[in-house]
Amino acid sequence: MEIRIIIWGLRQLARLPLDWNHRIGRLIGRLFVWFPNRERRVSDINLALCMGELSAGERLELRNRSLLQAGCTLTELAAIWYWPIDRVMSLVRQVHGEALLRCEPGQGLIVLAPHLGCWEIAGLYLASRGEVTSLYRPPRQAQWGPIIKQARQRSGAELVPTDAAGVRRLYQTLRAGGTTGILPDQQPDSSKGAVFAPFCGVPALTMLLVNRLLLKTGAKAVFCYARRLPAGGGFDIHYLPAPAGLGARDPVAAATALNLGVEHCIRDCPDQYQWSYKRFKDQPNDARSPYDLMN
């Protein structure tokens, strides 16, 4: 019943232009700012860990802006998921660094899109340029699975789950010279296939999948994010070169380069990063999680 209500709400929001959609999102974000909640607490902890160079007042201001943007992330799903795909693509105003997507003949391409801005439209835009195989983590509530797959696949992407079969499909795509999309800043489900590497100076359990794909297929990697423009103005998509070392033989060096690439993206619009995600839940040597005090 809860999912049906949410879907109904999204469909109603889809009737609105993007600027009104975002106004409602910012209103939801203000509720996150004003009242104690999980998103606010996690954001405070993450920003204290990652943005120590800022004063307490500057971090508070950044946290509040990020929660307003988080509200927009929620409500704009209505437009991104339910508008006709041509109308969704019309929201892309400018594309920066698109030349980075060019590869050598037969070479595969890995596009790494962190949880920054509107990653949903970044994926749809990429798939509109050609076939893409994208990795996604099936939701805990299985009812959302078909809805998410339908929304993300409607511009031509093929979604594969984060299991052995899905990873094999990524290898096949890259060896055939195709394109894959991966969210690089998710906390891995376990330490298997992952190492601890600094993210904004803090140890974070980091996936090695990207490194292994690069080493085994000779693919090229680029980073990508879609920056949300003010006043419902749409989105600018940015492609950035991957830092050196992403394909290193040393797994810690490779994971460090992966996290550095995410940091480079965040610098442009730090308030649009998903600071409410528990990125540091696992710590080296079973050290206490920084979020334990929340429980």
Image (cartoon, helix red, strand yellow):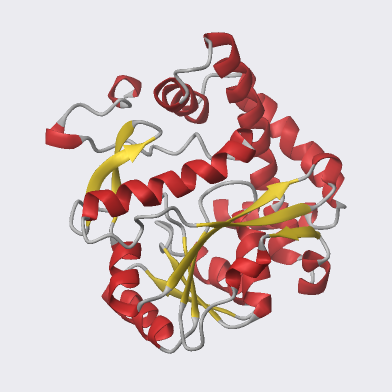
- In the displayed structure, 58 sits above or below 187; it is above
Q: Quadrant of the C terminus?
A: top left
Frontmost residue, 117 versus 141: 117
- In the displayed structure, 270 sits above or below 110; it is above
**Is residue 155 in view?**
no
248 sits to left or right of 184: left
Query: For residue 126, which quarter of the picture?
Result: bottom right
Give percent across and percent down for residue 238: 66, 55
Give percent across and percent down for residue 148: 55, 66
Query: For residue 149, which quarter of the picture?
Result: bottom right
215 sits to left or right of 70: left
Q: Residue at x 37, y 50 (%)?
A: 257
Q: Residue at x 41, y 62 (%)?
A: 137
Residue sticking out furthest to the left: 285
Give percent across and percent down for residue 91: 81, 59
Frontmost residue, 130 versus 246: 246
Frontmost residue, 283 versus 149: 283
**Is residue 274 in view?**
yes
Give percent across and percent down for residue 119: 60, 55
- In the displayed structure, 138 sits above or below 156; it is above
Q: Residue at x 32, y 35 (%)?
A: 280
Q: Residue at x 43, y 64 (%)?
A: 142
